[in-house]
């Protein structure tokens, strides 16, 4: 049960689009459509941004989108805003009712 | 709107047992699953376990031998016990609602330090 692989950091300028990848295996991301993404600002609790690969909870801007290809899931943020600067964590179901997180990606808005 | 609040000691001695409680307001814990996630300082999130009031419980295999989740429906609370703690268990511990393998919402988190 190794953590999902995320880049340590990504960056972008206001108005641009950025994507954050989350790579697993056929036993987790590749095998199920239960990938979720969380935004975490410093000193705050994580907040659900995407679930079931590409669904957005009520209140999350449509600038945030999710997708999956094979064993890799991606979170894309379009029209970057300064308040999007945060750490983003991915999570996947890996069968037998167990869950696995990635190591987190720090997004810097330049 | 469901709200969760963690409580418990902020300091635990090595080899002792960490005990935390999550108080839920705005909904009954007889609904959904309820779980725990932790985050060591400066590191990523780690799922610990989640449980339904009906009894079904699921544990992170790496922690299973040391973890217990219990529920008190009369107080609308659920609790975490982690035995034989070491410095590696120092983390912010979050409780959360678990629905269809996603965590939402979360409590604000509580820092637990393991030190003598």
Image: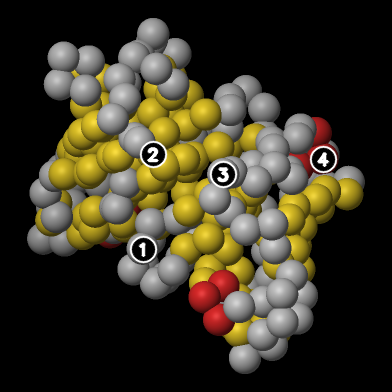
Q: Nearer the viewer, residue B2 or B29?
A: B2
Question: Would you call the spot at circle 1 few (<14 residues within 10 Å), some (14-19), or many (20 or more)?
Answer: few
- Image quadrant of residue B7? top left
Q: Nearer the viewer, residue B91 or B75?
A: B75
* CA separation in Å, label 2 and label 4: 25 Å
Question: Would you call the spot at circle 3 few (<14 residues within 10 Å), some (14-19), or many (20 or more)?
Answer: few
* CA separation in Å, label 1 and label 4: 30 Å
Q: Which residue is mark 3?
A: A58
Indicate the secondary structure of the residue bearing disc 2.
strand
Are the two marked residues, 1 and 2, in contact with CB atoms closer than 8 angstroms?
Answer: no
A5 left or right of B2? right
Q: Which residue is mark 1?
A: A44
- Mark nearest the camera among 4 and 3 is 3
- Image quadrant of residue B66? top left
Indicate the secondary structure of the residue bearing disc 4.
helix
B76 left or right of A110? left
Question: Would you call the spot at circle 2 few (<14 residues within 10 Å), some (14-19), or many (20 or more)?
Answer: many
- Mark nearest the camera among 1 and 4 is 1
Are the two marked residues, 2 and 3, in contact with CB atoms closer than 8 angstroms?
Answer: no
Q: Quadrant of the N terminus of chain A?
A: top right
Extreme residue in the top direction: B54
Q: Nearer the viewer, residue B83 or B34?
A: B34
Instruction: Confirm whether circles 2 and 4 share one chain.
Output: no
Residue A88: horizontal and vertical position, in percent? 57, 63
Q: Which residue is mark 4?
A: A30
Are the two marked residues, 1 and 4, in contact with CB atoms closer than 8 angstroms?
Answer: no
Q: Quadrant of the C terminus of chain A?
A: bottom right
A57 left or right of B4? right
* Numbered mark located on residue B96 in the image: 2
Indicate the secondary structure of the residue bearing disc 1.
loop
């Amino acid at each position: 049960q190794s953590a999902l692989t995320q880049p340590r950091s990504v960056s972008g300028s206001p108005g641009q689009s950025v994507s954050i990848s989350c790579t697993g295996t056929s036993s987790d991301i590749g095998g199920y459509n239960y990938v979720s993404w969380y935004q975490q600002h410093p000193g705050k609790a994580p907040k659900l941004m995407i679930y079931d690969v590409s669904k957005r909870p009520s209140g999350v801007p449509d600038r945030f989108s999710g997708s999956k290809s094979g064993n890799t899931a991606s979170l894309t943020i379009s029209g970057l805003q300064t308040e999007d600067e945060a750490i983003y964590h991915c999570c996947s179901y890996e069968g037998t009712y167990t869950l696995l997180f990635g190591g987190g990606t720090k997004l810097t808005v330049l | 709107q469901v709200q969760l609040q963690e409580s418990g000691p902020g300091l635990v001695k090595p080899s002792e047992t960490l005990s935390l409680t999550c108080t839920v307001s705005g909904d009954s814990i007889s609904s959904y699953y309820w779980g725990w996630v932790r985050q060591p300082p400066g590191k990523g999130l780690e799922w610990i376990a989640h449980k339904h009031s009906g009894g079904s419980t699921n544990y992170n295999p790496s922690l299973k031998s040391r973890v217990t989740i219990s529920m008190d429906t009369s107080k609308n609370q659920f609790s975490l016990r982690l035995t034989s703690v070491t410095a590696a268990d120092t983390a912010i511990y979050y409780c959360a609602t678990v629905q269809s393998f996603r965590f939402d919402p979360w409590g604000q988190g509580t820092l637990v330090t393991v030190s003598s």
